[in-house]
Image (spheres, rainbow, N blue to C red):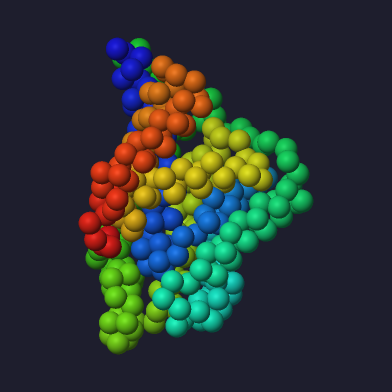
Amino acid sequence: MLGFIESLLNGILMGSIYGLTAVGLTLIFGVMKVINFAHGSILMVGMYAAYWVVTKTGMNPYLALLVVVPFLFCFGYLLQRFVIKPIFDAEKDVREPITVIIVTTGIWYVLDNLALILFGAEYRVAKTSVTGKMFEFMEMYFLVPKLIGAGITLLCGVYLYWFLKHSRTGKAIRATSLDREAATLMGIKQSQIYNIAFGLGAACCGVAACVLIPFYYVYPTVGVPFDIKAFVIVVLGGLGSIPGAILGGIIIGIIETVGAQFMAATWTELLIYAVFLVVLFVKPSGLFGLRQDF
C-alpha cells in the first residue's frame, strides 16, 4: 500500500511538470487556433539553454529561470513575429489555415536537426546541487528535484491563470481568444497579442526546461516525448483550458508512474492512449473543454 501511495505522489509530481508544458501549448492554441507542432522542440531549446547556463556558470538551476525564461519568451515572440506571422497574414482570409501547421512542423525538424549538428547526439546531464538527492517521508522516497520542480510549475500555473484573468494584457489575450474581430474593434492589436501568446507559451517551456535538467537527460530529440504527451494532455483536459492542462498532466503522470508498478512501459503507454480515447469518446471536448475560456 505504501508503495502505491509513493508511486501515486511521484506521478503527481511528474504530472505537474507535464501539465506546465501542456499549458504553453494550450495557451497558443486558445489564442491563435494553431496547433504548434514545434512545442517540444522549443522545450529542447530551453533545456539546452538551461544546461549551458548551469554548466558554464555554475548557477543554481532554479536561478537559471531568470535567464532561460526571458530568453524563451523572446525566442517564441520573435519566432511568431518573423516566421509564423507572414504565413498568417498570407492566409488571413482562409477559415482554417493549414500552412501555419505545416510551418510549425518544419520548425520542429529544423530545430531538432540544428541541435544535432551543433551539439551532436550525445546525452548530457547537468550535475547540480540537488541532482540525485532524495527526500524521505514516512518511509516513502521522493526525488528532491521533482519536489522542487512540481512546486515551481504549480506556482507558475497559478500565476499564469491570475495574469490572464486580471492583468490588462491577459484580458486582451482572453478577448482575442474569444472573438478576434470584436477584440480588434475594441482597439486590441491582434498580431501583438499573437506574439505575446506565443512568447508566453515558449516561456512555459523555459520553466519546464529549468526544472527538468537536474534529473533529465538533454539531447536533440528530447522534446519529442514531451510534445506527444502535451498533445494528449491538451486534448484530454480540453483545448484552451489551463486548469484542464494541469489536471490532464497529473492524470498522465499518475498513469505512467503507478502503471509502471504493475506492467511494462509499453503497456503503460498503451494505457495512456486508451484513457485518452475513452475521454474523447465520452466527452470529445475534454474534461474542461466546455468553452474556450481561461
The residue depicted at 36 percent of the width and 63 percent of the height is: 30
The residue depicted at 45 percent of the width and 31 percent of the height is: 270
Residue 137 position by quadrant: top left
The residue depicted at 45 percent of the width and 78 percent of the height is: 94
Vertical arrangement, residue 117 with respect to residue 6, above or below? below
Residue 175 position by quadrant: bottom left
The residue depicted at 36 percent of the width and 30 percent of the height is: 254
Vertical arrangement, residue 115 with respect to residue 79, above or below? above
Residue 171 position by quadrant: bottom left
Q: Is residue 6 left or right of residue 107?
A: left
Vertical arrangement, residue 190 with respect to residue 60, above or below? below
Q: Nearer the viewer, residue 213 or 264?
A: 264
Q: Percent x, y for residue 154?
A: 34, 44
Q: Is residue 64 visible?
A: no
Q: Percent x, y for residue 219?
A: 65, 41
Q: Is residue 164 left or right of residue 59?
A: left
Q: Is residue 41 left or right of residue 270?
A: right
Q: Nearer the viewer, residue 272 or 54?
A: 272
Vertical arrangement, residue 140 with respect to residue 49, above or below? above
Q: The C terminus appears in which quarter of the rendering? A: bottom left
Q: The N terminus appears in which quarter of the rendering? A: top left
Q: Is residue 220 visible?
A: yes
Please give the count of numbered marks on the rendered protein: 0
